[in-house]
Image (cartoon, rainbow, N blue to C red):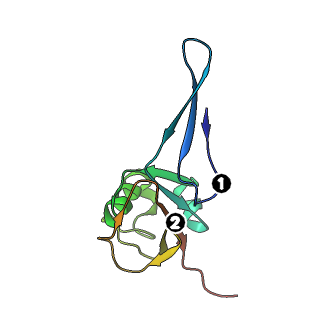
């Protein structure tokens, strides 16, 4: 059974499995957690996605590969943001796709909404 935390500051997932002795065994998986908010969530069709660490560009390319409906409106096929905001560990990232994203870090994608 997969347990999913409902906050982007908790990127790890616990996976419970029953071993041959009938005991619960919990394994922690870590990677980079990408969370989707607003219209981006609706278009992606999911709340979150776990990908491999790398540069921010690498992480966003993995997102496009696994959620192709996000291209080209929100992410280009190369992973460059288009009409969406990228937040890495609570800080808005505007241009630096070479920035390293390590295991356990969180990336949040949301739309650029205007109006009131």
User: Circle 1 sits on which residue?
Assistant: 6
Please determine whether, in this image, residue 93 is positioned above or below residue 108: below
Task: Please provide percent x and percent y for residue 78.
Answer: 30, 65
Q: Residue at x 33, y 70 (%)?
A: 99
Give residue 96's quadrant in the image.
bottom left
Quadrant location, the C terminus: bottom right
Q: Residue at x 41, y 51 (%)?
A: 51
Q: Is residue 51 left or right of residue 47?
A: left
Q: Residue furthest top?
A: 21
Give residue 47's quadrant in the image.
bottom right
Q: Residue at x 63, y 58 (%)?
A: 7
The mark that comes first in sequence, 2 or 1, is 1
- Rounded to the nearest whole Å, what is the CA distance between mark 2 and mark 1? 13 Å
Q: Nearer the viewer, residue 88 or 65?
A: 88
Q: Is residue 82 left or right of residue 109?
A: left
Badge 2: how crowded within 10 Å, few (<14), some, or many (20+)? many
Q: Residue at x 53, y 72 (%)?
A: 90
Quadrant location, the N terminus: top right
Please determine whether, in this image, residue 99 is positioned above or below residue 6: below
Task: Please provide percent x and percent y for residue 105.
Answer: 46, 59
Q: How many marks?
A: 2
Badge 1: how crowded within 10 Å, few (<14), some, or many (20+)? few
Please determine whether, in this image, residue 87 is positioned above or below residue 29: below
Label 2 close to label 1 by CB (< 8 Å): no
Q: Residue furthest right?
A: 116
User: Circle 2 sits on which residue?
Assistant: 108
Q: Secondary structure at mark 2?
A: strand
Task: Please provide percent x and percent y for residue 114.
Answer: 61, 85
Task: Please provide percent x and percent y for residue 64.
Answer: 39, 58
Q: Secondary structure at mark 1?
A: loop
């Amino acid at each position: 059974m997969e347990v999913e935390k409902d906050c982007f500051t908790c990127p790890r997932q616990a996976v419970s499995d029953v071993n041959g002795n009938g005991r619960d065994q919990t394994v922690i998986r870590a990677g980079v957690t990408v969370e989707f908010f607003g219209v981006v969530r609706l278009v992606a069709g999911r709340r979150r996605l776990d990908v491999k660490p790398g540069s921010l560009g690498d992480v966003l390319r993995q997102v496009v590969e696994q959620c192709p409906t996000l291209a080209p409106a929100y992410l280009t096929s190369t992973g460059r943001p288009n009409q969406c905001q990228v937040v890495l560990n609570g800080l808005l990232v505007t241009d630096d796709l070479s920035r390293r994203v390590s295991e356990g870090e969180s990336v949040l994608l949301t739309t650029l909404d205007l109006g009131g």
